[in-house]
């Protein structure tokens, strides 16, 4: 049996640049677009903050909104947008048979309670007892549900009625790669006809920054484009809040219901280079080789995080192929962790659909692309571990 | 020549290795002896002080060197020990497994012990600002790695030589079953001949316990710990938080037979259905759980009448057991009163992310040993659910097929159908 083709029929995007695929396209094709930055809230770090969002547009019930913190709201919102875009939202038959793979980290902790406990710990030796004392009295019971990784998917089921199946993958950028890869494999093999896949990241919370900074990964000092942070103070990552969801669909399924197809999702490849053993360069090269890049000029939507080692390795792998014109979108959106790879695939699909490339995001490090991109490469090389690439083809 | 494909023409998936750790001990032999003796692993909490806590008992794994070293290290060790046992039983090279890894594990967070020590290693600033400043001065990656969701699987991939990017997943209390389902699906797609599926959970911290407690999910029957978990009993009052791990080596039957491996059982079918009703409660009509059971049966190509035994999710919460009874009685009809249904959780508590994998391991052993482990503490049956829970004592019985249920917060429902023989 020949494998089914996988097509992208819905895109939901949120970042500091705005919301929706059209808004992102319009912004990103403006030459010299300036990033939206907030350097005041979490000094010495800069973040790309969320835009103003009217949650009611995708999460109708206030009660549902209250049950979530921003991370889950953001993901549920972006997912709803993708479902709307694919003409699936509100269609019971399609929603109840739709599969779902969400790439997730954890939700927000209560910073006030945590700070209170830490402050008290300075004058207490019985810290374990202190913990019990404070947590039993100060934690909001339902906050746990806003923190659980799989409850982003759970909220998508509740709010948007996607109930065919629900799986949550964890593991930073690699979770996003594996989610897209698994979803595509299920459609190709006939295990599924339509799948919602994506993730969200809410960086405007100290714990989310701590997750990077325990290894010194965050860039400090004045903001710079993603390719220009080597040697600067800090570890090179500037984070951003955002979300990206895709509706992937079997081609026949999309055609039979007369939907617009953005692009076809070609091969999705993942890897786990043993970086401590120096395998990253070879690992990225192997992924590009396995992807069987087409001949001629190739647009690459790079999810490079800015993390010094990983970004240098990716840049040298992309630069080694003179046909590749890379666009490091983290320059404009910041790094969105689990959402990074779905976001890259979405931007690739938009370029294919519009038959036009994005202008350079960093003129010193990126070169123009003048042709019509029929195939676009999307990458996510994890800031710490795991790698993935995909090819997105004209429909 | 055995039939190598199932009723849908897909490769049949065999189990060739099983590993398990629970509060009852390390390894299949110890666990099985205790489980069939009706022994409980639930005991008073000693890992942290229980002042101010309403629940002071658990099924923690307290006998490993890493038991007091935080959720991440303990979860890794639990996963490694179970996987090592499974791979050794399968007769495969434990440093070069040669297939993908699917790990069900709890979401990770920076442990409080680390938060305290980072915070108190400095005096400037307060709150998160101080933590961030101390963090960026750290010279080692140890603490960082406990906060990365992919790190445990990354270490396991190094340890066992699994192939490709390992998948770490969470479907809450159904996670272990999902890890097996992902392995089955990968083999059926022809992506690999074998897969390593692990469910491991060593996250029974004070904060985890308090979070579940605040949701009124835990038993508070502290006085006689081994009596606290009483699935399907009238006086059940919540689950008992526990730790453990289960690992399965899954192989296409063809590959297993080709290398002369012993086939321990067959993973015949997987089914799932998400619930859109509520974050912690099930749809009152049980329809998503019913759909998950039916999907697993259909995937396995078996009718309701062909299931010999149900390994229940059976958490001992008022809500779960009622809903599970409703869904099973809807699917199995009148037969529900006479088919054996037991809950391993009556003895080991709820191992959360590991539960589906641990209970799949026990389901496979039930078939191999022709012994059904009991539901202990069944002294006060809930009259609203007439079930044969294999009360209090093990039962010798030929079991050819098992349905194992896993249901979790966030509307997660995953069911597995296992068989002793390939068709």
Image (spheres, rainbow, N blue to C red):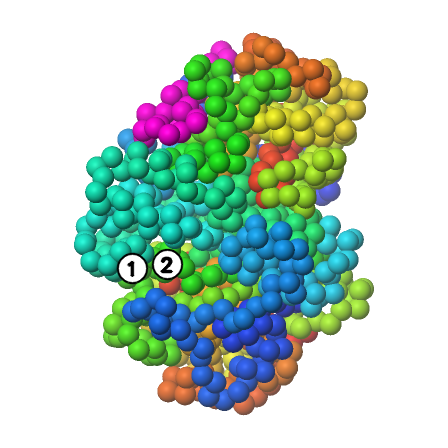
Q: Are marks 2 and 1 in contact (CB under 8 Å)?
A: yes
Q: Secondary structure at mark 1?
A: helix
Q: Residue at x 35, y 27 (%)?
A: B50
**Same chain? Circles 2 and 1:** no
A96 shown above or below A177: above
A51 shown above or below B67: below
Quadrant holding the C terminus of chain B? top right
Answer left or right for B105 relative to B46.
right
Answer left or right for B100 relative to B399.
left
Q: Magenta segment, which residues?
A: B36-63
In space, the residues marked 2 and 1 are separated at their CA atoms by: 8 Å
A135 shown above or below A178: above
Percent across and percent down for residue A294 are 55, 76
Tell me the subunit letter for badge 1: B
Q: Which residue is mark 1?
A: B129
Q: Nearer the viewer, residue A199 or A296?
A: A199
Q: Residue at x 35, y 79 (%)?
A: A224
Q: Which residue is mark 2?
A: A206
Percent across and percent down for residue A394 are 65, 76
């Amino acid at each position: 049996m020949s494998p089914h083709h996988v097509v992208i029929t819905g895109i939901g995007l949120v970042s500091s640049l705005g919301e929706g695929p059209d808004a992102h396209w319009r912004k990103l094709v403006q030459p010299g677009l300036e990033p939206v930055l907030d350097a005041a809230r979490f000094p010495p770090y800069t973040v790309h903050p969320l835009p103003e969002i009217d949650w009611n547009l995708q999460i109708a019930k206030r009660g549902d909104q209250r049950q979530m913190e921003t991370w889950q709201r953001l993901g549920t919102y972006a997912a709803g947008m993708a479902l709307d875009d694919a003409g699936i939202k509100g269609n019971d038959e399609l929603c109840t048979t739709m599969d779902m793979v969400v790439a997730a980290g954890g939700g927000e902790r209560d910073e006030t309670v945590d700070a209170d406990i830490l402050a008290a710990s300075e004058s207490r030796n019985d810290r374990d007892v202190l913990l019990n004392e404070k947590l039993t009295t100060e934690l909001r019971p339902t906050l746990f549900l806003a923190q659980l990784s799989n409850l982003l998917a759970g909220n998508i089921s509740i709010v948007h009625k996607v109930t065919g199946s629900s799986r949550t993958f964890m593991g930073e950028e690699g979770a996003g790669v594996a989610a897209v890869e698994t979803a595509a494999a299920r459609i190709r093999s006939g295990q599924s006809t339509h799948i919602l896949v994506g993730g969200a990241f809410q960086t405007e919370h100290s714990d989310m920054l701590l997750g990077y900074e325990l290894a010194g990964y965050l860039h400090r000092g004045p903001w710079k484009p993603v390719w220009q942070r080597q040697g600067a103070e800090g570890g090179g990552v500037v984070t951003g809040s955002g979300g990206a969801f895709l509706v992937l669909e079997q081609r026949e399924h999309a055609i039979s219901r007369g939907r617009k197809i953005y692009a076809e999702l070609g091969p999705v490849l993942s890897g786990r280079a043993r970086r401590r053993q120096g395998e990253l360069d070879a690992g990225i090269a192997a992924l590009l080789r396995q992807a069987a890049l087409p001949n001629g000029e190739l647009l690459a939507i790079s999810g490079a995080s800015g993390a010094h080692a990983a970004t240098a390795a990716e840049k040298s792998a992309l630069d080694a192929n003179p046909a590749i014109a890379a666009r490091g979108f983290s320059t404009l959106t910041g790094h969105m962790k689990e959402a990074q790879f779905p976001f890259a695939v979405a931007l690739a699909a938009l370029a294919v659909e519009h038959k036009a490339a994005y202008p350079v995001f960093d003129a010193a490090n990126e070169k123009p692309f003048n042709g019509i991109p029929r195939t676009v490469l999307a990458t996510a090389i994890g800031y710490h571990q795991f790698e993935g690439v995909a090819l997105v083809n004209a429909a | 020549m055995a039939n190598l494909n199932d009723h849908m023409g897909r490769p049949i998936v065999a189990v060739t290795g099983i590993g398990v750790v629970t509060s009852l001990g390390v390894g299949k032999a110890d666990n099985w002896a205790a489980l069939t003796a009706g022994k409980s692993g639930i005991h008073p909490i000693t890992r942290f002080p229980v002042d101010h806590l309403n629940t002071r008992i658990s099924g923690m794994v307290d006998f490993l060197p890493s038991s007091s070293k935080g959720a991440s290290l303990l979860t890794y060790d639990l996963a490694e020990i179970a996987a090592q046992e499974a791979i050794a039983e399968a007769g495969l090279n434990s440093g070069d497994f040669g297939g993908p890894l699917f790990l069900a594990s709890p979401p990770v967070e920076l442990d409080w012990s680390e938060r305290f020590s980072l915070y108190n290693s400095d005096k400037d600033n307060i709150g998160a600002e101080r933590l961030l400043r101390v963090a960026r001065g750290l010279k080692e990656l140890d603490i960082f790695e406990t906060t990365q969701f992919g790190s445990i699987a990354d270490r396991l991939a190094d340890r066992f030589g699994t192939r490709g990017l390992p998948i770490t997943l969470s479907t809450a209390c159904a996670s272990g079953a999902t890890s097996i389902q992902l392995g089955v699906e990968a083999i059926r797609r022809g992506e690999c001949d074998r897969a390593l599926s692990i469910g491991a959970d060593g996250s029974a911290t004070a904060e985890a316990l308090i979070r579940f407690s605040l949701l009124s999910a835990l038993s508070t029957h502290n006085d006689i710990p081994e009596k606290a978990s009483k699935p399907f009993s009238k006086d059940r009052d919540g689950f008992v938080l526990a730790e453990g791990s289960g690992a399965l080596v899954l192989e296409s039957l063809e590959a297993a037979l080709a290398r002369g491996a012993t086939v321990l059982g067959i993973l015949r079918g997987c089914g799932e259905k998400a619930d859109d009703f509520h974050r912690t409660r099930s749809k009152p009509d049980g329809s998503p759980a019913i759909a998950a059971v039916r999907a697993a049966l259909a995937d396995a190509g078996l009718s309701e009448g062909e299931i010999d035994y149900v390994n229940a999710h059976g958490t001992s919460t008022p809500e779960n057991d009622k809903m599970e009874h409703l869904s099973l009685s809807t699917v199995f009809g009148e037969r529900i009163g006479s088919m054996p249904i037991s809950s391993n959780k009556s003895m080991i508590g709820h191992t959360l992310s590991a539960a589906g994998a641990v209970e799949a391991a026990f389901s496979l052993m039930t078939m191999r040993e022709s012994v059904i482990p009991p539901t202990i503490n069944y002294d006060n049956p809930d009259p609203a659910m007439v079930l044969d829970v294999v009360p209090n004592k093990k039962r010798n019985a030929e079991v050819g097929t098992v349905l194992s249920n896993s249901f979790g917060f966030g509307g997660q429902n995953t069911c597995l159908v296992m068989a002793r023989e390939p068709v």
